[in-house]
Image (cartoon, rainbow, N blue to C red):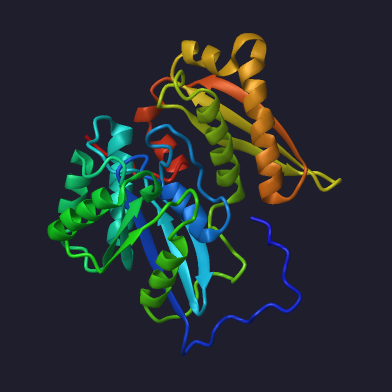
Amino acid sequence: MPEPEQPQNPEPPPAASTARCGFVALIGAPNVGKSTLINALVGAKISIVTPKVQTTRTLIRGIACEGAAQLVLVDTPGIFAPRRRLDRAMVGTAWGGAQDADIVALLIDARKGLEEDDEAILHGLADVRVKVLVLNKVDLVAKPTLLALAQTLAERARFAATFMISALSGDGVDDLKKWLAAHVPPGPWLYPEDQISDAPLRQLAAEITREKLYLRLHQELPYQSTVETEAWKDLPDGSVRIEQTIYVERDSQRKIVLGKGGRAIKAIGTAARAEIAAAIEQSVHLSLFVKVREGWGDDPERYRQIGLEFPRD
């Protein structure tokens, strides 16, 4: 990702004796707002957000600095009862991110309250030493309901702290960020001060296009579609030429993505090109192709492409 514009008098990183750095995993059921929260904590969009369940498929790391602390924020796939191989891979990845973290933040959608998936997650967190509870979307819930939900969850697990936030509006996010900064372990920073993600540019571009695909075709698009960046070429004029392929499992799905007269794929490409260009601060020439790849959900190589471990039956 290109370096953001530097201030005229940048502050040096903290001295080794005062620096803190740690991994914070954001976990929760699908669509509770994990990606929106990580973007709010980082202060930039590094994780895609759509209404489609399980938009996040692999671990996305955002990097945020707060005082002398650097937070490596891990956005994980939503945890739910898996049915298909891809589901199992994503849920396994989410739990792996939680087990490797210094702090685990459990997000609960305060509007929905405690649901079946949340119950399973609470059970899985029993042995996690440092965990915090984050009730999201609290601006949409009456205060007595919030307090009752917080009390119920406090009785179910020993949380180090509880936060009530709206990731979308930013309310309460600063308090959460300050607490995390004060409680990650002492240690040197792992990334430069101005880096906001460790995602390769090819992955970032593919995720942006997948977001636009989902937003355009949320209801019609089958869950098992994916986007791969096949070519990336820097041109002499400072622009970049990107070629991406959208893979689906059947020809009928390909027709949905293309749309009548190619209108759907053109709209997806226009939206993706604009956001990729803003993210990498370069002019972008984006070419999108749609191909059928039958049974890609059972191909180990495809899992490696998107950063997932292939689960064996």
Asked if residue 284 lies left or right of residue 25, the reply is right
Q: Position of residue 73 (x, y in %)?
A: 44, 60
Q: Position of residue 136 (x, y in %)?
A: 36, 50
Q: How many marks?
A: 0
Which residue is nearer to you in this view: 227 or 232? Answer: 227
User: Which quadrant holds residue 261?
Assistant: top right
Asked if residue 64 lies left or right of residue 80, the reply is right
Residue drawn at x 47%, y 65% as measured from the top left: 174
Which residue is nearer to you in this view: 203 or 179? Answer: 179
Asked if residue 146 lies left or right of residue 123, the reply is right
Q: Quadrant of the C terminus?
A: top left
Which residue is nearer to you in this view: 22 or 308? Answer: 22
Question: Looking at this rendering, what residue extends furthest in the bottom direction?
Answer: 17
Q: Quadrant of the N terminus?
A: bottom right
Q: Give above or below for 113 relative to 15.
A: above
Residue drawn at x 33%, y 40% as measured from the top left: 30
Q: Position of residue 220 (x, y in %)?
A: 46, 18
Which residue is nearer to you in this view: 135 or 251? Answer: 135
Question: Looking at this rendering, what residue extends furthest in the right direction?
Answer: 237
Q: Give above or below for 221 relative to 169.
A: above
